[in-house]
Image (tube, coloured by chain):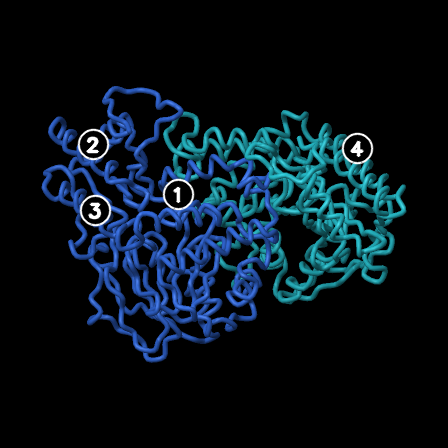
Chain colours: A cyan, B blue
Amino acid sequence: MISSTEEHDMGSNERAFNFSAGPGALPEEVLRQARDELLNRGGCGVSVAEMSHRGEHFIAIAEQAERDLRDLLAIPADHAVLFLQGGGSQQFAQVPLNLLPEGGCADYIDTGFWSVRAIEEARRYGRINIAASSHDDGYRHIPRQARWRLSASSAYVHYTANETIDGLEFDWIPEVGDTPLVADFSANILSRPLDVSRFALIYAGAQKNIGPSGLAVVIVRKDLLGRARRCCPTMLDYRIAAGHGSMYNTPPTFAWYLAGLIFRWLKAQGGLTAIAEINRRKQKRLYDTIDASGLYVNRVEAKDRSWMNVPFRLVDDRLDEAFLAGAEVRGLLYLKGHRATGGMRASLYNAVSEAAVDALVAYMTEFERERG
Amino acid sequence: MISSTEEHDMGSNERAFNFSAGPGALPEEVLRQARDELLNRGGCGVSVAEMSHRGEHFIAIAEQAERDLRDLLAIPADHAVLFLQGGGSQQFAQVPLNLLPEGGCADYIDTGFWSVRAIEEARRYGRINIAASSHDDGYRHIPRQARWRLSASSAYVHYTANETIDGLEFDWIPEVGDTPLVADFSANILSRPLDVSRFALIYAGAQKNIGPSGLAVVIVRKDLLGRARRCCPTMLDYRIAAGHGSMYNTPPTFAWYLAGLIFRWLKAQGGLTAIAEINRRKQKRLYDTIDASGLYVNRVEAKDRSWMNVPFRLVDDRLDEAFLAGAEVRGLLYLKGHRATGGMRASLYNAVSEAAVDALVAYMTEFERERG
């Protein structure tokens, strides 16, 4: 815990308050366990990072991680869970390569930076219908479903459940009838309960709420496997990954292990219902501080604001540098906004404690009083 | 160091002798450093696994890793170094997707299990000419270049510099004139000096001599960038990766960091000339033990034997279980051969010490005396 307001080197045992958008904060308990067994996992004489992925020790780690994730999200048995590589960005290609037939059409909802990335990549593989977009108001809201224009013969409907840069989040699941529903949950998976049975496919880069970067989790209905296009690399074919327990080749073992530790940690916190209550309080405290201030601004419509990523601006952007410098002195790190938007962004992933948010709002209030 | 011949639980500080084919042994010094800074890297208050990849701390780590790798291998300035995901298997698709034009042809050399994997994947993208193969003798040798039948208009020539399962290794670089030379160095990169300037492209999954799994290093001549096919996912386009310093999206930061620590460790060992001398001694000791025995057999032609992966069989395979059980008691781990071949395999990557090889040959000698 950092309380000094004087500039100081951070000692080797002090931990900062980490608001990074990803790779993001990891729970300190998880890092401690990983540290304590980094040279020798459970008396087996090697690090998890040195284990054959085909050996009994790693297989046990991998299977436990999947079981715990299934428990946390109540994933139905007819969905496969895949531990892959390439992050969300590789899924932008992998989804159409597996689910969009040659000459087919898919519906996409455009709610910001990451939606656009997904749409641009999908366009390389077929006709993409933008069924709804909030581009024209600068991505300050999520289009209500009543205004969506879904196409008649869509292979799937894709949306971005959380826009990490624009700061929007769906707190509802679209109703799309029998059309497969596909969603990018990179930043908000495991932040609150989710009815996975409503989805044909969910994907998430790990480096926000699951674990370190270099891992992506895909949850896909098994009846959708086996439809990959001829040009789809074997490594990107969901059926191959599912058929080999995500071990067609060597998986990212250490990242998978850390993810498993985080799933355990989440269960120990009380699961997703408990973590959602904490996350609700965290975001409310920060948005309330922003809305009550004359210095900080977030322009996203209140009902569509992300719990995980809170972008905000200082009304006088000449104060940006001073704000960031003062934050760093207090061990409040990675508050600088994305290059595409400027301003500030505080990411409030599961591993960001309420104490971290308290420290941030205290600093913001103090900064406004002194400089605002 | 483990000397007891009695069965015992390995204490939390004892390290086994790890002969895993990959993920393989990592240097203990590297693991110690990673452990000591796992919660707080260099006083910056966060773990490397929690750092934004766009922040100054991680950028410094990433750039240092590339510099050290360039130093170790004397990589020419006209080659880009990429830190990617998906392992060697993803490269089996990525190479033709980037270098094989529609309707084009490429030459492949077939020397074993991994060559075949590369060939099968490449066949999905064009005409593949098997310019040479040792399939007919059960992959017991590497075809001499004089017998290769290269095609006249090949987009590139691909070979597998080390066959991790079959236990073969090229100790020479093929001469292919102006045709781009492409090689899979997954298991033997950094095990001895290499003239990178002879290659158009080298790729290597990290989990043998570079670091943990979940990372792949690609070294590619810059004039070959920008040729990706239309159907190539953006994430698999070398030009995109090179243009973004391997950060088109979030890279596997922790794996990249560990790789950087290993590059430093290699430099501290005296670089590749020094490590090659150690590797030469290690493999000689093991092959000499095998060849002098009446119990152990390796059938690869002596000049083509891999320094990194030594497969061997017991002439009486009913002794396999007893051999493996006795090895485990002595902390000699992961000696079981690949599922595809059975028997045994000892991998002697850079991080496997001479002491480990001494312990292995002592055990093999003792086992033969008692049970052979």
Q: In the image, residue B27 lies at what x, y percent?
A: 36, 41
What chain does mark 1 sit on? B
Which label sits on residue B318?
Answer: 2
Quadrant of residue B5 within the rendered picture: top left
Q: In the image, residue A114 lies at what x, y percent?
A: 70, 56
Which label sits on residue A186?
Answer: none
Quadrant of residue B72 within the rendered picture: bottom left
Front-lying residue, B90 or A322: A322
Q: Earlier in the sequence, mark 2 or mark 1?
A: 1
Which label sits on residue B283?
Answer: 3
- The secondary structure type at the circle numbered 2 is helix
Question: Disc 4, disc 3: CB below 8 Å?
Answer: no
Q: Using the rendered image of the protein, determine whether residue A218 is visible from the camera's viewpoint.
A: no
**Left or right of B305 in this view: A86:** right
**Left or right of A212 in this view: B143:** left
Q: In the image, residue A61 lies at what x, y percent?
A: 48, 32
Q: Amino acid at mark 1?
A: Pro
Q: Which residue is identified by label 4? A: A281
Residue at the far bottom: name it. Answer: B152
